[in-house]
Amino acid sequence: MSLFLQLLINGVTLGSVYALIALGYSMVYGILKLLNFAHGEVYMIGAFIGYGVLTAVGGPAAPVVPVWLLVIGMVVVAMLGSGVLGVIIERFAYRPLRNSPRIAPLISALGVSFFLQASALLLFTARIRSYDTTEFISLGTGVDIGPARISLVRLLAIGTAVTLMVALTVLVRQTKLGRAMRATAHDREAAAMMGVDVDRVIVATFFIGSALAGAAGVMVGLVFGRIFHLMGFVAGLKGFTAAVVGGIGNIPGAMLGGLLIGLGEALAAGYISSTFTDLIVFGLLIAVMLLRPRGLLGTPAVDKV
Amino acid sequence: MTPIGTDEWVAEAEQRRQGDSGPLAPLRRGLMRVPPVGRLALLVAGAGLLPVLSDSTFVVRVGLNALLFALLALGLNVVVGYAGLLDLGFIAFYGMGAYTYALLSSDQLGLHWPTELAILTAVLATVVLGYLLGLPSRRLLGDYLAIVTLFFGQAFVQLVTNVDRLPLPGGRTLDLTGGPNGITGVDQFRLGMLHLRTVQDYYWLLIVVFALAAVVFFNADNSRTGRAWRAVREDPLAAGALTIPVNRLKLLAFAVGAGTAGLAGTVFAAVQLGVFPANFTVTLLIMVYAAVVLGGTGSIPGVVLGAAVISVVPEILRDPDLSRFLFYGVMVSTLMVLLRPWRVLAAVLVATVAFGFAIRGLVDWVWPGELIEAGGGGGKVADALGSWVVMTPGNVLVINLAFVALIAAVLTLTTLRPAVRHIGLPAVLYLSAFVWENRLVTDPSITRQLLLGVILVVMMNVRPHGLLGEPRVEIT
């Protein structure tokens, strides 16, 4: 029981990270019908920005600012940086290709992803860096739930994720920008005719999606410690799987999918084998695609000619 | 603004049809005038000359890699170029071919099948695998296919890295793939009486295989099936309405591409005398994609050109002097193509040189004695560069900042008006020379990755049909 609870907590932590990545994928796909392969790399850069902030304020052992401010600062700066990066990627790699064959932006995205990975390797070298979270947030603090314990870091990560997701839901449901985003996702041309500034909406979508990925990067750094230049690839794949499992283009779907993938991975690692978690996630993806090609929460769409 | 009364689409279509422009247009037109058989003969003769001209094993090995690459690119071209399916698990089929052959002809399982049978089994296995992977993807939209196959490629690497301790009934374990250490001691090819031993032998074999594959794919492209593939690529829905069996054609393209990769994999396993999980990573996938995209998706000569460029350039980058030559050569020739009239070109070049000396002088004046001379290996070019480029190899922060600034500057330049762009150009050129000399030359593997990424993005933006490809008229 204790193991199960512990795995559940691991799963929810992982799941909230995947959900944040999945949201960016899903939002961009919903609006542009574009698979943003570079999204995983944006998440990786976000993790490095967080690390940069941590080093800038004096390192994990002796930060010159209070811990709460440090964590908020890391998340906010990483979100801003990643968001700007996402907007730059959109402007230079995707926008010129908006009317090209579907395959062109996909290959361009692949190129961006590869370029960012190599740039990170060039700038930060292949050394694996650690946030050393235990230096400034003690492992001992946390909340006990029955026989298991959630450490403060995990609580922080889950809390941040939930806050961001609530904020995003409010943004999409309640604000004018959110309405414009939904309209653009539904039918870009019609939205443009109704006076929606489609370019602005797309830029905003990229900014928000990438900022969420940046936050996810910092959270992973805080919880799991290790960051390196290749971390984006697999995380991006998982995030995308989460988006597909939940129903791509569907925001609650991305959250649900992320949670499911995270839980599935944690439970599989605990009960089956930790080496094959990726294969298990892959199997999950294939199964969902065969049974519900539009994802768990996706609505069947009719192809228009 | 288009004047009223002109149909914009017609005008654009006209432009696209004439779109055979750019630096390589004469080459392309000349090439197309040669009949296909002649083109193939030309290529085979050219490739055949290599081992005759050079007896260096290294050179032949580079040629062999280029041929392997060309074969892979040909296979991928069927899937991506003809049928328009974004198959990101392509390298897994290459690996599957290599691993199947290695398992059937090494001590790993104690099997040493005859080469012909092993190759046949390996190719069949990859075809079946390609077919199976195609099955769930059949009903998926193009993008879902991409992600499923990408995941599949990842899963393949993970699988072969981890199935070295398969539990068997009876408490024993089976080491199927050797894990991260791979399978070594793979048999060489014995085709009938021929025992292929040296790199040269495999080079000749690959020329034959490649020529056969090129003939088959060329004819396939011009056949009923090829036309159907193109129809499916352009519009699956319309193709289906014309009673073209869309699903079957997709599966066929998948299986053909997989089989080609599998065949290339067997040769790879035999020539390397072993297979390792690290041989089949995403990097290779990106390289093959870059080859296909660079040359022109759907064009066989283009794909061959792309494969040659992508496999030879990294080898050139290994040598600082050659890579320097390549870098400045490409830079100047790009400028020559882009900057017209020549007065602008001359002005920009002179300004760049002057700018460099000014900066170098300034840095010397501010921090005297800090700079070291550029270029290892000497030579006139290196000497000239030494008094032009600021060299601070130890200054990681400055170089990193310069790298980021270079990316930002290049991106900004593309958004500016031409007149303004020309003013900014010298500084950017100098910055790129600085980054190149200080960092990129010393790290060819990273430089290669950066270049691959840039090639993919730039080609998609500037010339989506590649260097030798047919421009496509898009109907939306």
Image: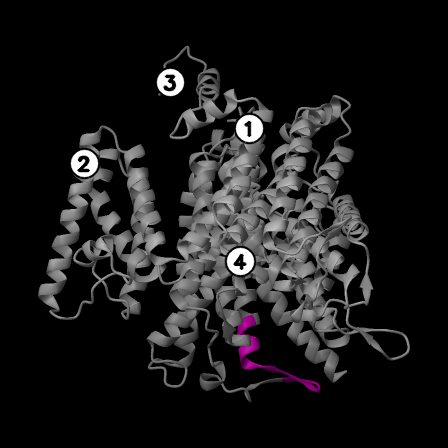
Task: Give coordinates of residue A241: x percent, y percent.
Answer: 65, 56
Label 4 sits on residue: A40
Task: Give coordinates of residue A137: x percent, y percent.
Answer: 48, 84
Tell me which amino acid carries mark 3: Thr
User: Residue A52, labelled with which disc?
Assistant: none
Task: Give coordinates of residue B148: x percent, y percent.
Answer: 68, 50
Q: Chain of mark 1?
A: B
**The one of B475 and B171 positioned closer to us in this rendering:** B171
Comes first in the chain, label 1 or label 2: 1
Q: Chain of mark 2?
A: B
Tell me which amino acid carries mark 2: Ala
Spatial CA distance of label 3 from label 2 is 34 Å
Label 2 sits on residue: B346
Label 3 sits on residue: B2
Q: Chain of mark 3?
A: B
Q: Quadrant of residue B371?
A: bottom left
Asked if labels 1 and 2 share a chain, the reply is yes
- CB of mark 1 within 8 Å of CB of mark 2? no
Q: Counting other residues with Cα less than 10 Å from the Cα at mark 1, is it few (<14), some (14-19), or many (20 or more)? A: some
Magenta stretch in the rendered image: A144-157
